Structure formats: structure tokens, C-alpha cells
Image: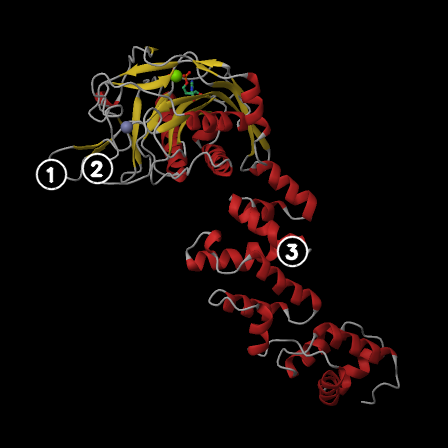
Amino acid sequence: MTGDVWEVVIGLEVHVQLRTRTKAFCDCLTAFGGAPNTRTCPVCLALPGALPVLNGRAVELAATAALALGCTVHEESVFARKNYFYPDLPKGYQISQFDRPLATNGRVTFRGQDGQPRVVGIDRVHMEEDAGKSIHDRYPGLTAIDLNRAGTPLIEIVTAPDLRHSTDAGVFLRQLKRTVEYLDVSDANMEEGSLRVDANVSVRAKGAVEYGTKTEIKNMNSFSSVERAIDVEHARQSRILADGGRVRQETLLWDAARQDVRPARSKEESHDYRYFPDPDLPPLLLTPEWIATRRDALPELPNERRARFVAAYGLPETDAEVLTASRNVAEYFEQVARAHGDGKAAANWVVGEVQAALNTLGVDITHLPVTPESLASLLDMVRGGTISNTAAKRVFALMLTTAEAPRILAEREGLLLVNDDATLRQWVDAVCATSPDEIRRLRAGERKLLGVLVGQVMKTSGGRADPRKVSALLAAMATDTSAFKP
Ligand code: ADP
Ligand code: ZN
Ligand code: MG
């Protein structure tokens, strides 16, 4: 195995589109889609004389993300021009930040695939604007340009080269996505390109201190393809080194169809960006009070929430993980737990039936037809013994198609448990008559037969008997010899 001899070293550069209504330096809308080149103006089209004006909301979101990643947000940062030529870059430069970024020196902890905690340094978080899109499949032999995306605000998050496994990169990225979603900073949607990842990869002999030469892989469109690309590059570089060769520093593109990396054409690989401070934009100045306010406003983050769910509700880690996968699921669960009172039961249902329903319906939990309150009242019925857990699942399925209250549905479907003594005794008597031997052994002290007999009564009742009461009746019978005569 290459991994045993040649260790992989990974650093990630993640671009996250900020969820602002308008672009970073003009009033054009940022919404995904729209007829090509309709969401543009002299500023984002780079017409002569047009001047950028910084979007304050973008700064708020960028600072929020940086603080959540443990970074120091600087009171002064500087916008710089990153110069390169590409058809979808109208100004011939991208407004970015270079030697004075918004934020530096953060850290993120996450749990590795082996369950052990890992720490990843965050070198920097800086603000920049997005480029437009080159569309290669619209006109045969031609490239079309859509500048709707040009000028959309982004942050770039640069990690230290601290990751040592492709799977850790995947876990880190999923957590990062979850974090920016929790913060409401971004949609973080890889398919729509609002979260994009470049992976820097090098390989060194296990135990070596120096890093090897890195390559940079671009063009992955899912977290699993990031992991796959790192594995492929790990193997490629290991083979080169094992053969006594040297890795060439270059930019590679992930080719999903071939599941392989290939060198980028030279125009996709830019070396000299000739950065300099943008003379059209003054330095970005933030007061310590402003930064403190943003820090205080940070919501509970996924890691903290997961730990709280484990501690407060006594949930297993795996359930807490599922329940914090998205902020909406976490909030739904907590509303059920609060309304019903039993967090464990609420968790079982949200992890089980609710997730299954979401998968079947293909909807987000905010569109689930069952409100947290009505799920809680269904769980109240189970706890109160008016309905069995199995029958509750049938009621839940009905609740997905109607807004009627669970109690009404259970009644109409004949799913309420019978717990009046006379009826229960009839069923118990019937079982006594057909299983005299088991009854005798129960009364002789074979307690384990209780479960068997409860099961028989449940069967006789067509599942409608309240099992707790049946159990109590049978137990009383086992000790009170005058109660029944088999
Ligand atoms: P560059 O000068 O090429 O831009 P940086 O030092 O700015 O390199 O780092 C860019 C990214 O590459 C960061 O995510 C960093 O962690 C990662 N990186 C740097 N050196 C290595 C290495 N030897 N192996 C893997 N990743 C690396
Ligand atoms: Zn514009
Ligand atoms: Mg760099």
C-alpha cells in the first residue's frame, strides 16, 4: 500500500459564495440563473469610469464566517487587484485581497474517520469577487460568456497543510459546509458552484519532516470527487517518488469521466498575478466594537450543538450527528423534544421515521407536512398508552398526506389501544383457555413466559390491546391464585 510508505499532505482552498442579495461592488442581483448577461451593470461589466462600492452585508457575512472558523478579523484589510486575462473576467483583474486579508490564523476541530479529534489551521479568510462563466456547450465550436455571476461576493478559506487523509478532507469539508449553512452565510451548494474546492496535494516518506512538492487540483464538483482526486494524486506522486523521480509543481484538473487528473492547459494555470492595492477602493476599516458585535452574534455551531444534544438529551453520538446535519433538522428535533418532553423518543422518531419520509418525499424538512407540534402530540399518545409504537408509525404515514390531528386519524383507523378492563380480560381469558400449560408455568414462577403470553394476547386482540395493561393483568394473575382458574 502506497499509504504505508508515502504519506499524503493536503491543504484546501475553498471558495464560498456569500448569500447577499446584491453583488460585492454594485447593486446587481446575485440570484442563481437569470437570462445570460441580464444581471449586469457598468461596474460589473467593467465599463470605463465605473467605480466599485463595497457591499457592507458581504463584509458582515465574511467576518461572521471568519470568526466562526476561529480567525482573527483584522481592523484593517486591503483590496488588491489580481491581474490575469480570461474571457469571463471583464476587468482583466479580479478584486481580491492579498497581503492584508480580512482574517488570519484560525483553527477548526473535527472528528476524523477513526473517531479521533483533528485540528486544521485556517491560514486566512479573504474577500474577493467571482468571475463570470464561460459556457462551452451552447454554440458548437464557440465559447459563450455569461457575466451574471461576475462580481458576486466570495470568501476564500485557505487551510494550512494539516490534513493527512483524503477522508479527513471530506469530513472537514462537510463540516465546513454545515458551518456556513448554520451561519446563513452561504447556500454552500456545490452543484450550483456556490462552494468550490481546490486541493493542494504533496507526498512525503512517512516520518519525513519536510513537505514534498505540491500540485493543485481543481475542477472537482462534489466532496466525494475531492476525496477521490486526492487518492488518485496520492498514488500518482507516490509512484513517481518510488521510482526515484521528482514531482513537478503544476495545476491539475480532475477529469470525472476518466476518474483521473490531467495537467491544466497553460492558460488555466496562471503564475504572475501582479497584485497591487486597488486604487479605487480604500482600505477596509472595522472597529473592534463592530468585530466584537459580530462575534457575540455567532449562533451555536454544529459541533457545539452536537455535544449539547449528547449531554442534554442523552443521545448517542451517531444520532446527534444525524440531527445536527442541518440547522433545520436540528431545530425541528428540538421543537419536538421540547413539546413532547422526552428527547430520546423525539430523536428516535426524527432519525427514523422523519428522515425516511424526507427521503421518500424528496423534500427538505421545512416542507415536511408534519409539524413538530403534531409529531409531539403523536408521541404523547404513545407515551400515554393510547396507541402502540407500531400503530403510531401508521398514523405518521397518514399525517404526511393530511393535516388532521393524530388522535382523529388513530380513531378513524381503529388504531387506538383498548384499555378498558372488561375487554382486556376477555382477551386474557381467551388466551388462558388456549394455553393452559403456559399459564400454569407462569404461575409456578416462570416469569419469562409473561412476554410470550402478552404477545399472544396482543395477537388475539389484533394488536389493539394496551400491552402495558395486559402485562399488568397477567402479572397479577401469576401471583394471585384466586384470580383465574385455567
Ligand atoms: P502558494 O504559494 O502556492 O499559493 P500557499 O503556501 O499559499 O502556496 O498555500 C496554498 C495552499 O496550499 C494552502 O492550502 C496550503 O495549505 C497548501 N500547501 C502548501 N504547501 C503544501 C504542501 N507541500 N503540500 C500540500 N499542501 C500544501
Ligand atoms: Zn453590476
Ligand atoms: Mg498562496
Tell me the number on the disc at residue 36. 2
**What amino acid is labelled 1 in the image?**
Pro
**What amino acid is labelled 2 in the image?**
Pro
Seen in the picture, residue 214 relative to 115 is either above or below; the reply is above
Name the quarter where the C terminus is drawn. Answer: bottom right
SS of the residue under disc 3:
helix
Name the quarter where the N terminus is drawn. Answer: top left
**Which residue appears at 26% of the width and 34% of the height?**
39
Seen in the picture, residue 9 relative to 364 is either above or below; the reply is above
Image position, residue 191 (x, y; %): 34, 41
Residue 390 visible = yes
How far apart are labels 3 and 2 at the CA level?
48 Å
Image position, residue 25 (x, y; %): 34, 24
Residue 247 visible = no
Mark 1 vs mark 3, foreground winner is: 3
Is residue 471 toward the left or the right of residue 157 in the image? right
**Which residue appears at 84% of the width and 75% of the height?**
445
Q: Tell me which label, 3 or 2, sits earlier in the chain.
A: 2
Residue picked out by circle 1: 140
Is residue 156 toward the left or the right of residue 132 in the image? right
Residue picked out by circle 3: 339
Image position, residue 192 (x, y; %): 33, 39
